[in-house]
Amino acid sequence: MAEASTAPRARHGSGLNLRLWLPLSWVTLLVVVAVFARWIAPHDPLAQDLLLERLPPFFMSGSEPGYWLGTDSLGRDVLSRMIYGAQIALFVSVIAASATCVFGSVLGMLAGYYGGWAERIISRLVDIWMAFPPVLFAVLLVAVMGTGLTSVIAAIALIDWTRFARVVRAETLVQTRMDYVDSARIGGARRASTLWTEILPNVLPTIIALLMLEMGIAIIVEAILSFVNLSISTDDPTWGSMIAEGRNAIHFAWWVLLFPLIALFFSVLSFSVLGEGLRQRFDPVLQ
Amino acid sequence: MTATPFFSVRNLHLSFADRAHKPLFGPAPRIEVLKGLDLDIGEGRITGIVGESGSGKSTLGRVLVRLLDPDSGNVMFKGQDIAGLDEEALRPLRRDLQMIFQDPMSSLNPRHKVWRIIAQPMKRYGLGGTREQATEALVRVGLPAEFGDRFPHQLSGGQRQRVGIARAIAVGPSFILADEIVSGLDVSSQAHVLMLLSKLAKEMGLTVAFISHDLSVIRHLCDDVIVLDHGVIVDNGPVEQVFDDPQSDVTRKLLAAIPLPEMDDTWFER
Ligand SMILES: Nc1ncnc2c1ncn2[C@@H]1O[C@H](COP(=O)(O)OP(=O)(O)OP(=O)(O)O)[C@@H](O)[C@H]1O
Ligand SMILES: [Mg+2]
């Protein structure tokens, strides 16, 4: 009887944990690889060797020891390029997602909390902003600002702040109507401080979930911009540029395309699952 | 009769914007919720406010603690008109005007620990707000000291409402508004929470406005009672007087609806 009642709960618990631990492991791996790229990468990611071009990965015949995931059409080591690519992907996603998050969340909280003019101006701005097709917007922006990581980051923040603003505004609106807000007023809190000390902690789980999602999105956007050659120089090892190059050689060197694509896919998936998992983990009522 | 009453409300009007009937252009029409109320609340007394749902009880209460701005009229608190004061002018008075809310799940911040919920107002009012003071307040409302480390969702309904009481009394107010504070609790928790409130009110010499739609609770707890109906006071006076000789049909109807067996004189001693 006792076992029957604990067994399903244990399964439920481990299922939840696995959903959190798998993406967490992948992200941890990504971080470790990015930080220690210089020591982990077996080869120089830029070193070309035409004698070693299009080597297959280790499990195929004709592979060369030391070139685990093969080489591309210029003889550069795919694994090393992916490791350095993780560095760029993470850098862009952390900076871009944080900037997007802070900008969008602050506007969303102000609109949701103060209502009135603040709300009307911010909501109108969001509406106008969202009328632009985002990719066109990004391409235009990079075209104006010039290629490079800074413009990629700026493009992501300028496109995606509306996602934060909209969702955080709605959540703030819900929280603002809770009695604990009136209660803080009775307890001597100033209006502005109530927003940051009482409401923010309750909106934070939502913000963290969005932030994680945004980190995944930032990785994709950077890859897309690299793919269309609008990110950093083509020599630099980004997953996007690797995918773009790999596309040309897909029939005789599929690994150049596939491995960075898998890394991209797992990273984006991990960040979004992680966001939802963290939200549930930190929501005291769902605990 | 000559002393200034604790609360003295004159010709109080309050209306809300009716957004459901807002025309495409122009302002929304207003619904008048409080239609010219006159009432006094005596110092150290527990005044019940009753009436049917939607009669304006909470609205009146929230004007008294100035969570709402009246349209017109006077709200004299210890001789000072607080009806028109802005937030800055109200701040020194807020400590004196505390409130316990109906739903402690919503009125206690779910992400703050219990001790912090109690200590924060004390800190803001310059009364310290240490962990020890919060513990003291917890013990005072009959909760174990270690509950300070819990989050509100880790307490039962009755315990949460005690935390609400602890927070209100910790700042040493002279007035507490209790808005339907037991309506979400089971009968035995109700009795305990009400007993606690009346005990503390007596000990601290508090003036209490007690909103309820349950006349049997009012009869046992309150000294005076105000009966509201659609934003108008239809009965007002000491509890015995109003209950023995109700002046309006609304009061008579409410009195007839008292469920007899639930309450008797031993109810509070349980
Ligand atoms: N913020 C608001 N905006 C518009 N109308 C409101 C608002 N608050 C209350 N009202 C309306 O004012 C009237 C009185 O509400 P109030 O909350 O004071 O009633 P109550 O007597 O406390 O009722 P209950 O016993 O259900 O709590 C109701 O008709 C209600 O719909
Ligand atoms: Mg009410």
Image (spheres, rainbow, N blue to C red):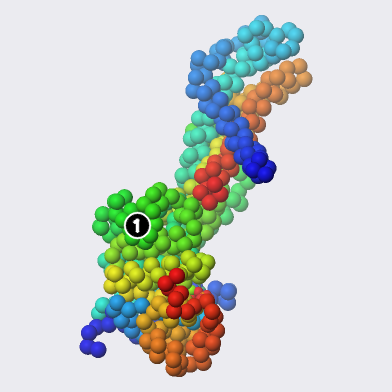
Which SS class for mark 1? helix
* Crowd rating for badge 1 (residues with CA inside 10 Å; few <14, some 14–19, many 20+): some
Farthest-out residue, left: B2
Classify the position of the N terminus of chain A by image quarter.
top right
What is the three-letter code of the residue carrying label 1? Val
Q: Quadrant of residue B68?
A: bottom left
Q: Is residue A62 above or below residue A240?
A: above
Answer with left or right where residue A91 lies relative to residue A131: left
Farthest-out residue, right: A251
Say if disc 1 is inside 8 Å of ligand 2: no
- The chain under label 1 reads B
Residue drawn at point x = 53 percent, y = 82 percent: B260
Per the image, the residue denoted by label 1 is B139
Q: Is residue A228 above or below residue B43?
A: above
Residue drawn at point x = 64 percent, y = 31 percent: A266
Residue drawn at point x = 70 percent, y = 9 percent: A63
In the rendered image, residue A280, in percent from the top left (x then y), is placed at: 56, 45
Residue drawn at point x = 29 percent, y = 77 percent: B44
In the rendered image, residue B20, in percent from the top left (x then y), is placed at: 58, 74
Q: Quadrant of residue A229?
A: top right
Q: Is residue B40 above or below residue A116?
A: below
Q: Which of B155 and B103 lies nearest the eye of the viewer?
A: B155
Q: How many marks?
A: 1
In the rendered image, residue A227, in percent from the top left (x then y), is placed at: 64, 29
Residue A108 visible at all: no
Q: Quadrant of residue A159?
A: top right
Residue B4 visible at all: yes
In the rendered image, residue B198, in percent from the top left (x then y), is placed at: 36, 72
Q: Which of B246 and B230 lies nearest the eye of the viewer?
A: B246
